Image: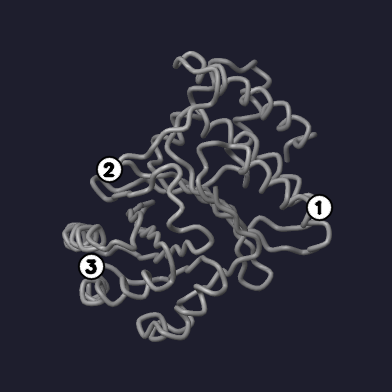
Amino acid sequence: MISSRSALLSRASAHLSRVSRSLAAKAGSDELPVKEVAAHGSPVTIHPYFEITDMHLATPIMDEILALAASDPSIIHYGWVRDGNRHLFRGVHLPDDSTLACYFAGLTPLIQKLTDNAAKLEKFVVHGPASKFMESISNADVYMTSQEREVKEEVESSDLWPDVYEEVDDGYFSKIKVGDMSAKNSLVTMHPHYKIHDWDQAQPIVQALIEVSAREPGCIFYSWHMSGDTLICREGFIDGESAIKHLSEVGQLKDTLVDGPASLDRIEVHGPTAEIEKLKVRSNALRKLGSSVEFFEEHCQLEK
């Protein structure tokens, strides 16, 4: 257990924030840069999952996490969604090296504060490109004192360090641009989790799914990530209607994927309550999966 962890992490957070701004300034900007994601660029999603034990104590800390995301110019969508007492903070972060380190450094002590007072951390995951995340954190090491590096190393070996899922080569597309409000208050994301039995057989099916999804106007990002034998698809849609159409379009391909090369473990669906209700009522594909589907509905959801 890290002694005085919250205080030390707060100091490390402040230091990393200074580092990130220094890196941004060296890149030729006095402000933290906001970058547009090109069609081939893939955002980073950072998802801590919590079991809330005291909502009264948790709420102000959850608001602090919202405020942190609101202050980061490279986060384009953020908010809390929930499944009963399980809460998930979902942030869609543009892949910017300098701001990613800053955001993670600020988020870590808030996660510790929440788990110290009102929640249990169920899991903490980052979906790629993982190299961007790891590089941004590693680059900050050279600016740290030995004590700050020691704190960071302790965090890396604790529950506060996320499981990082690497992006599959050529396994993504993104249509996200800064200022695009097409999914304002309606963004739905789906996250099917598979166990891979034969990657050589699965890979061409994965590529076919990317190609089909890229042609759908309502699908704004789509990517595949692996850790060990776990394969996760990260799918973003402008609304529930677009997600329903997508499930209909790719049904045969997904049946082929789970007919040998892989097996479906579960699927998470995140989004505003009104959009989630459309999927619950109208999606035959999700209804057939029954208890394998976990719906996380809007608790507090904001978008820039």
Give the residue type that dot 3 points to. Pro
Residue ID for mark 2? 40
Dot 1 or dot 2, earlier in sequence: 2
Q: Where's residue 288, x and y in %?
A: 38, 86
Residue 218 marker: none
Q: Residues within 10 Å of mark 2 (few under 14, many from 20)?
A: few
| Residue 211 figure quarter | bottom left
Helix, strand, or loop for circle 1?
helix
Give the spatial CA distance, label 3 vs label 1: 43 Å
Q: Secondary structure at mark 2?
A: loop
Report the residue marked by disc 1.
Answer: 117
Residue type at tag 1: Asn
The image shows residue 185 at horizontal and vertical percentages of: 54, 61
**Reading the chain from its start, which is encountered first: label 3 or label 1?**
1
Q: Is 73 left, or right, of 250 in this rendering? A: right
| Quarter assignment of residue 229 | bottom left
Placement of the N terminus among the 4 image quadrants: top right
| Residue bearing mark 3 | 261
For the residues labelled 2 and 3, say whether their Cβ atoms are less than 8 Å apart.
no
Amino acid at dot 2:
His
Colouring scheme applied when the structure was drawn: one colour
Calculate the distance from the C-alpha at mark 2 to the C-alpha at mark 3.
27 Å
Q: Is residue 225 above or below residue 289?
A: above
Foreground mark, 1 or 2, reads 2
Q: Nearer the viewer, residue 26 or 262?
A: 26
Q: Position of residue 170 (x, y in %)?
A: 23, 46
Neighbour tally class for label 1: few under 14, some 14-19, many 20 plus, Cα within 10 Å: some
